[in-house]
Structures are given as C-alpha cells and as structure tokens.
C-alpha cells in the first residue's frame, strides 16, 4: 500500500511568497466534495464534468426527492490532482470528507466505526462517460471485527453480517492490497468441500467466521500487512484505489478505443450501503424506463431476490423479470416482481415516470430493495437499438416530452444500418470461421462459390450463392449481383468488392485475411478448416464475420416511425442527398430510401456485360480509329437503353453520369478463351491479340491509362458515351414531355486543359444530337479526386459547372495508400494510434479535408455558383457528412442503402451547427 493521505499541495517552491499564499488559500477553500441525500444535493445533472455521470445523476435524483441512499462525490479534479501528485490529495480534502460522513451519519442515524450501529459505505468510480467494469469498486466498507457484531444484531441476521464482512475483506484485499481473488475462492472451496456444502447459502455464520480468519492469515502472508481494522484507513485506501484504477491498463485501453481523454479523470462516489441480500424481502435489479430492444413504453428489466449487485453481474443465478409481460415474453417460469413485490413494483413504476419526465429520455436505472424499502442507486440515459431509438423518439414527441428537433438528434444516423438490412438473429448460435472488414452490412447465408459465373449459374437455378474471391474486379459484377453475399480475402473498405457490394446492398466481408482460396482445387481454407464449393456459410457484413452453416436471420422492417423521423430530418437538413446508382434496381431502391437524384452513375459496368465486353476489347485492340468506332457502335444502343431506363425511373430528377473511368488495363482479355473470342469478333490474329495484351498491360493501372486520359487518347469512347446519354435524354423527353436534366461528369482530371478538351468534345456531340429543337439540359463538370485538381480548382472551375469530390481516390492519392491493399496494415496503424480511423471510412479531415476546403474556396472564387458535391464512399458516412456540411457543400451522394444515414446525418449537422 503506497497511498499517502498527507496533503502536500502542488509544488510551489519557486513562486514568490504572496503567490504561494494565494494558491494555498485557494486550494484550502476549493470545494472537492459534493454531498447528496435526504431530498437535497450540492450538485446537479449539469455538473457531469466535475461529478461524473453517476455523481451528477445521484445528486439530481436526490434533489428530486427520490429514495437515494445519502452520500458524497469527490470530484474528478481530485483524480487529476492525485494522478499528477503521485498519490497525494489536495489540502482540506480530509476535512470535507469528514464533514460529509457526518452528514450521512445524521441522515441514517448510524456512526462510522460504531460497534452498535455502524455506518457502512460503498466506494464507486464514476467518470464523465460510462466505462463499464473498467474501474474498481469497494462495498460493505466500515466492517471490522467489532462493527460486524453490530451489523449482526442490528440486522438480526449474523449469517448475513459475516457473509458481508468476508465479501468486504475479499474485495478490499483484491482492489486495495493486490491479493487476487483466487486465493479466497480457494479457501472458500476447500471449506465447502470439507463440509460437503454445494452452495454459499449452505454456510452458517460460524462457517463464515472461520473463513474470515483464514482470509486474514492469507492477506498477511500475501501482502505483508494485516487487513486494516480502522474504517477511516479502509476508506482512504479505497478512495485511492478507485482513483488509481483510472490509470489501470484496462481503463487506459478502453479510453483509447473510445477516444476518451486521459485527463478527464474519475469522480469517487461514497454512499451509505443498502443491502439487497437481507432476506426474501430484499432484492437488487436493473430496469429501463422503456424496452431498450423494441422501444415499448413499459418498464423493462430484471431483478434477483436476496442478492447483491455483484451476484447479478456474476451470472450465477438466473435473473427474474420485473413485469409479467416481460416474464411472458421471455418464457420465464420465475415469478415477476410485479407479482411478488407489487408495492415495490408500483413505486418503481412511478419513479420511472418521474425520471422520464425530468430527463426527457429513456433511463437505465439500478435499484436495491432492502427489507421492503426501495432505493435507486443510479440513473443514466439507456442504450437502445435503432428500432427502439426511433420508436422512443417519435412517441416522446407525441407525449410532449421532446421537440421534433430533439427527436432527430436522438437517433444515431449510423445505427440506421441495423434497420435496412436483414441481420443475424441475436439469439442464434454461431461458429465464426473468419473475421474481415464489415464492408457492407446485412446478413446472408448461401453456398460458397469461387467464380462470378458459378454464382450466376447457382442463382439461375434458384440457389443462394456466397461469392468468395481473393479480390473482385469489374468482370465479376454479374456474379456479385447474382450472389447474396460476397467475401474477399484481400482489400479494404473502398476496394472494388466493398464499394460495389454497398451499392448493390449485398452483404460483404472484405479483406478476411485468414481465408485462403485455391481456385484450382475449388476449395478454401479458413482457420484450419477446408471448405468445398457448395458448402454453406453465413456472413455478417455488419460485423465482418464469416460463419459455418446457415445461421438464422431477421428481415428488416421500415416502420411508420422511420418515415416520420426521416421527414423531420429532411425539413432540417441543408445538404442534398443523392445516390450512387448505375442499375435500374439501385435507382428504385434509392428512391424508396429518399434519394433526390443520382450523384454518381458509374458507367463501367455497362461495358462488362455479355457481348459488350467483347466489343470493348475489340475497341482497345483496334489498330485504327475507324475500327475503334466500329466496335463502339455496337455498344452505343445498349448504353442508350441503359441511360433511358435510368432517366425514366428518375422522372426528371437530376442525374450525374460519369464518363468511363477505370484503367483500360481492366478490360483486357485474360484467358486464352477470351482472347479467342476477341480475335474472332475483331478479325485479328490470335498472335496479334496476345502481343497487344502484353503490350497494353500496365504496372500501375490505378495511376495509368484511365479516366479522362482515355477520353483524350481515344476520344471516340467519350463521344459514344455522350451520344448515348443525350440520345437517351431526347427519347425520354419525347416520351414524358419533361426535359431531362443531366450532368456529365469527367473523371480523373488533374489539369484544366484536360477538362477543356473533353468538354469541347461533349459540346460537339451535343450540337450533332440536339438538332430540331430537341432539348436535353446538360452541363459538364468534373470529379476532384487528384490532389493536383484540388489545388488547381480555381483554374479547373473555369471549365466546370460542378465539382464532385471522389474522396476514395482523393484519399488514396493524398495518403499514397492503395484502397485495395491498405486493409492488411491499417488495423495495426489504428491499434497503435498512428491514425485515428480508417481514412477510407471516415474522411481524413486534417489532410484530405483541407484539400477539399481549398478546392471549394478556389473553385467558388472562379465560379460563385459552382455546385459542389461528394460522391466517394464518405458521402454515406455520418461523421464525414457532418464535415461536408461544415465545408458548405451542396450535396452528398452515396450508395442506396446509406441514403437514409446521409439524410439523418445531414439533419444532425444542420441542427448542431445552427446553420
Ligand atoms: C472516388 O474515387 O471517390 C469515386 C467516387 O470514384 P470510384 O470509387 O469509382 O473510383
Ligand atoms: Mg475515383
């Protein structure tokens, strides 16, 4: 034990005499201890920073007149002092603690250390935010060889008294003196075995007395000290232990993971003990003021008769339900509190209303019943599922407890993910084989297949397929679409598989590095297990797990609450929310989810389907412009039909179509069979095709012949696409009588001249197509996805009507971090704190974000009405959307299933910034 309760104060050796006196006097008068109890409190709920969540809640409840055992809170400032001054306390703390104990003694008519009516205390941590189970607690403090006798006669239950004493010794020895639990468990087990006892409840007062003697001997031999008998020594050592536990390894790791600053510190709550283990009229439990899973407006929770809080946590006994409804729902045959303790139940139910009205939120409360008297030990906002959050928010508006604005802020945008996809039944058993990145939410079961063609074949025969690939490429699109889920063993959150799966709403686990696929043998090895093609797995794209066999799932239900809350959100947000969609299915889904238009229609998949890929390969391998045009003419009508269908579905809403972006390298034929097909179709010799394939292969395709570079070297490609877009616009204009609005977006621009050349090409085609008064409203803009483009935004804006940040590539290029490979080492970077989060998931605000800010400022300086959007994956990430709002962007665009998240996040941004 190294704790000193001497009050050294801060070092002030080097200060002038008057300053020293000043500081010491301030310290002497500073308030470090806040009392509560008997309907009064020094603090209140606004003082969480100083009193911690638990302390602030106890003060508030006490002032409300709720039955809270009296106590006091030592502030978080003392924790900081204690940590900075090697275990010492500020001056005057002991006086304030002594006065506060006297206040408890007065309320409870007991005395600390009194052999007849001893005051017993609990000492608990309580930081600003909950850190469950991370710090230490000491209960039953104040018991010693004399006071235990007082407790025995006062409670008329010696067995209870000695059991409480041994629990205290065990806890104190572990937390304060560093003597681990297992020594005591061992003594207890030996005693039980010697007496042939099975349960702790078989032990009598004498048994506990004998065990206590053995505990004390063990403590002396292990710690080199006796267990302290003086209650004040016990108290100060316990306070120190709780403060020290703020810095234990568990708590430090937890804070790092949760981004909780180390200098917040914990408060210490010292409170009169109440006992839930004083017989059959005593109990302890946890209750929620509404059901945290469903949101139903009824008390919900569990309790244990004749037990202390630690028994509930230990899980040795099965808890009972508080309500009869809960008992029925949980198919429990144990009696509900509503049945066996009706008056306690009614009192608890009345407190639930008081707390909800006071806090205007669902509360999670801890309670203890001591011989028929109810005490509340804690209240805090209760954690809830997304479904419950929506229901509670909507109903609280109806009940007049909160405003619509507050309701919108009550639902975490990212949590909506839980509602939009099927999910694993939380009660189902599962055998997890592998873990990768949670790349696209949703749960799916199916037969594993290793090729896109096989996935398609299986789907056509009515079976469900899980497509497992080392990584995917645009050629796999048809298989990804046919599969119910996708697993890759390589790749990050913006790898091809992840982006496409999110777009399609397919569940996807990406970068599961312990999955080894052998395409030749048609097997995959995972965690030492060999799976054959056709074996069944279940994947959870929300957690990144791959599981063996079929695990039951639950279908999503978008209730009325969902659309009500989203309606309120839409009224408040300033950012437009568009969708990244390139198939009719995506477009329809996106409209269902509330998208206002298409912010990014990637056209590449339109080149990969069926005969198109052959024509595209003919185009790449052609030896002259005429042959290239001939090949592209085959693709034109198909693209025109694709665009027409999209315009038809979008019914006049704005549509942004991006011209071809991926490296030509990706279109090259790979296999001999593919080369045969192309050579026949193009009338080229097989040898020539082979040579060209080798010649055109790129070492670094992501930085190669892609985006507008293709549009400049092979203008026929963009000409054909522009023609397809505008002719489709004309067709739909005629069909519906409504002019089509289209934004033609040029990818991978780094230099103003690139955009100028491509724009001239687009305008030339438009002149050819839009004759005879045909009207399609088109504008030309660009992606900003290269750092150079962001820096040169002022010049580029001369040619662009709009910008859309391609933050996937912009992140890749700014960090020099491959979006397909970073998944293998980024987790180490996150763990070691080198980066806060995967920058492909949450926008890197201080790097990529600064480039975006520059681009917005410079672009709008040139063109004040420049429309600026974001269409990288960050457009559907709540945190990044809030950042986009702050940057003053006009809109965000994201995959269909993330549209609701973006809508709600945009409303949060508007409401919290007041703009
Ligand atoms: C981007 O780079 O952010 C983007 C939207 O384009 P893609 O993901 O198609 O490269
Ligand atoms: Mg890009």
Image (spheres, rainbow, N blue to C red):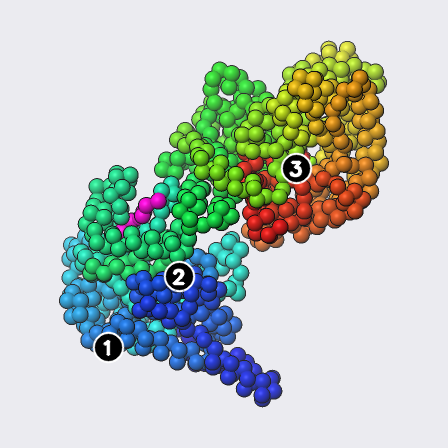
Real-space Cα separation, disc 2 to disc 1, in angstroms: 30 Å
Name the side, left or right, on which 346 lies relative to 473.
left
Name the side, left or right, on which 224 lies relative to 858.
left
Work out whether 84 lies above or below 250.
Answer: below
Quarter of the figure that contains the N terminus: bottom left
Work out whether 150 lies above or below 848.
Answer: below
Q: Give the x, y percent position of residue 204.
A: 15, 62
Q: Secondary structure at mark 3?
A: loop
Question: For mark 2, what is the residue?
Answer: 57
Q: Of marks 3 and 1, which one's residue comes earlier in the chain? A: 1
Count of numbered circles in the view: 3
Q: Judge whether residue 195 is colored magenta.
A: no
Q: Give the x, y percent position of residue 242.
A: 40, 66
Which segment is the magenta one? 297-303
Q: Is mark 3 within 8 Å of ligand 1?
A: yes
Q: Give the x, y percent position of residue 461.
A: 49, 15
Query: Residue 114, labelled with which disc?
Result: 1
Work out whether 246 lies above or below 671.
Answer: below
Query: Residue 871, labelled with which disc?
Result: 3
Residue 305 visible in this rendered orientation of the protein: yes
Residue occupying the point 56% across, 49% down: 911
Real-space Cα separation, disc 3 to disc 1, in angstroms: 70 Å
Asked which quadrant contains residue 308, the reply is bottom left
Q: Secondary structure at mark 2?
A: helix
């Amino acid at each position: 034990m190294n704790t000193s309760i001497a009050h050294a104060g801060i070092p002030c050796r080097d200060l002038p005499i008057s300053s020293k006196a000043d500081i010491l006097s301030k310290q002497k008068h500073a308030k470090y201890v806040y009392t509560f109890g008997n309907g009064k409190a020094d603090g209140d709920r606004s003082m969480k920073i100083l009193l911690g969540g638990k302390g602030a809640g106890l003060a508030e409840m006490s002032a409300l007149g709720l039955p809270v055992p009296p106590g006091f809170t030592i502030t978080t400032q003392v924790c900081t002092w204690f940590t900075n001054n090697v275990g010492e306390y500020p001056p005057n703390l002991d006086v304030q603690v002594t006065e506060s104990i006297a206040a408890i003694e007065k309320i409870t008519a007991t005395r600390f250390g009194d052999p007849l009516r001893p005051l017993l205390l609990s000492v608990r941590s309580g930081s600003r935010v909950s850190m469950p189970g991370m710090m230490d607690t000491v209960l039953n403090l104040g018991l010693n060889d004399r006071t235990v006798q007082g407790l025995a006669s006062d409670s008329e239950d010696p067995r209870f008294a000695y059991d409480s004493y041994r629990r205290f010794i065990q806890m104190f020895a572990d937390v304060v003196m560093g003597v681990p639990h297992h020594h005591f468990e061992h003594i207890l087990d030996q005693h039980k075995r010697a007496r042939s006892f099975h349960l702790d409840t078989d032990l009598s007062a004498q048994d506990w007395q004998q065990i206590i003697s053995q505990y004390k001997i063990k403590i002396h031999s292990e710690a080199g000290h006796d267990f302290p008998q003086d209650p004040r020594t016990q108290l100060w050592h316990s306070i120190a232990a709780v403060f020290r536990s703020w810095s234990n390894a568990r708590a430090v790791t937890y804070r790092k993971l949760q981004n909780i600053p180390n200098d917040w510190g914990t408060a210490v709550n010292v409170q009169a003990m109440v006992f839930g283990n004083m017989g059959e009229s005593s109990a302890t439990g946890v209750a929620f003021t509404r059901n945290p899973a469903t949101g139903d407006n009824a008390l919900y929770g569990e309790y244990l008769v004749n037990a202390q809080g630690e028994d509930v946590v230990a899980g040795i006994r099965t808890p009972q339900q508080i309500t009869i409804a809960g008992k029925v729902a949980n198919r429990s045959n144990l009696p509900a509190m509503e049945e066996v303790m009706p008056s306690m139940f009614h009192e608890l139910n009345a407190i639930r209303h008081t707390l909800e009205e006071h806090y205007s939120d669902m509360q999670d409360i801890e309670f203890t019943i001591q011989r028929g008297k109810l005490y509340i030990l804690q209240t805090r906002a209760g954690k809830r599922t997304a479904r419950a959050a929506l229901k509670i928010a909507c109903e609280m508006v109806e009940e007049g407890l909160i405003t619509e604005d507050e309701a919108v802020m009550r639902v975490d945008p990212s949590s909506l993910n839980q509602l939009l996809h099927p999910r694993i039944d939380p009660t189902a058993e599962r055998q997890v084989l592998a873990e990768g990145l949670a790349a696209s939410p949703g749960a799916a079961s199916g037969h594993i297949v290793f090729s896109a063609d096989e996935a398609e074949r299986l789907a056509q025969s009515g079976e469900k397929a899980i497509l497992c690939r080392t990584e995917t490429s645009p050629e796999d699109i048809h298989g990804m679409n046919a599969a119910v889920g996708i697993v890759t063993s390589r790749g990050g959150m913006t790898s091809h598989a992840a982006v496409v799966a999110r777009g399609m709403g397919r569940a996807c686990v990406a970068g599961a590095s312990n999955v080894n696929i052998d395409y030749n043998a048609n097997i995959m090895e995972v965690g030492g297990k060999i799976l054959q093609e056709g074996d069944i797995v279940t994947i959870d794209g929300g957690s990144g797990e791959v599981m063996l066999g079929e695990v039951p799932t639950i279908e999503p239900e978008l209730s009325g609450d969902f659309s009500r809350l989203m309606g309120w959100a839409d009224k408040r947000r300033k950012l437009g929310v568009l969708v990244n969609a390139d198939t009719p299915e995506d477009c329809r889904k996106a409209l269902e989810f509330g998208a206002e238009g298409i912010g990014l229609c990637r056209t590449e998949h339109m080149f990969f389907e069926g005969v198109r890929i052959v024509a595209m390969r003919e185009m790449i391998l052609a030896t002259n412009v005429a042959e290239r045009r001939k090949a592209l003419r085959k693709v034109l009508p198909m693209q025109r039909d694709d665009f027409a269908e999209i315009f038809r579905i979008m019914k006049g809403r704005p549509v942004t179509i991006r011209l071809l972006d991926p490296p030509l390298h990706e279109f090259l034929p790979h296999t001999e069979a593919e080369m045969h097909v192309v050579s026949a179709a193009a009338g080229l010799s097989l040898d020539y095709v082979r040579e060209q394939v080798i010649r055109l292969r790129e070492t670094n395709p992501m930085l190669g012949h892609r985006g507008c570079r293709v549009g400049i070297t092979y203008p026929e490609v963009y000409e054909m696409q522009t023609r397809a877009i505008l002719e489709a616009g004309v067709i739909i204009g005629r069909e519906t009588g409504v002019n089509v609005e289209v934004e033609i977006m040029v990818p991978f621009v780094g230099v103003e001249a690139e955009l100028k050349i491509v724009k001239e090409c687009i305008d030339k085609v438009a002149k050819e197509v839009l004759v005879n008064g045909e009207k399609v409203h088109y504008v030309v803009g660009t992606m900003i996805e290269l750092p150079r483009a962001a820096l040169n935004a002022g010049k580029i804006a001369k040619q662009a009507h709009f910008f859309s940040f391609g933050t996937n590539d912009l992140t890749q290029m700014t960090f020099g971090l491959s979006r397909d490979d970073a998944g293998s080492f980024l987790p180490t970077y996150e763990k070691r704190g080198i980066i806060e989060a995967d920058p492909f998931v949450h926008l890197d605000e201080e790097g990529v974000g600064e480039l975006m800010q520059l681009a917005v400022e410079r672009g709008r300086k040139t063109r004040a009405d420049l429309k600026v959007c974001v269409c990288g994956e960050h457009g559907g990430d709540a945190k990044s959307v809030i950042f986009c709002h702050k940057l003053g962007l006009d809109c965000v665009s994201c995959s269909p299933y993330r549209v609701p998240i973006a809508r709600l996040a945009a409303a949060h941004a508007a409401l919290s910034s007041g703009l």
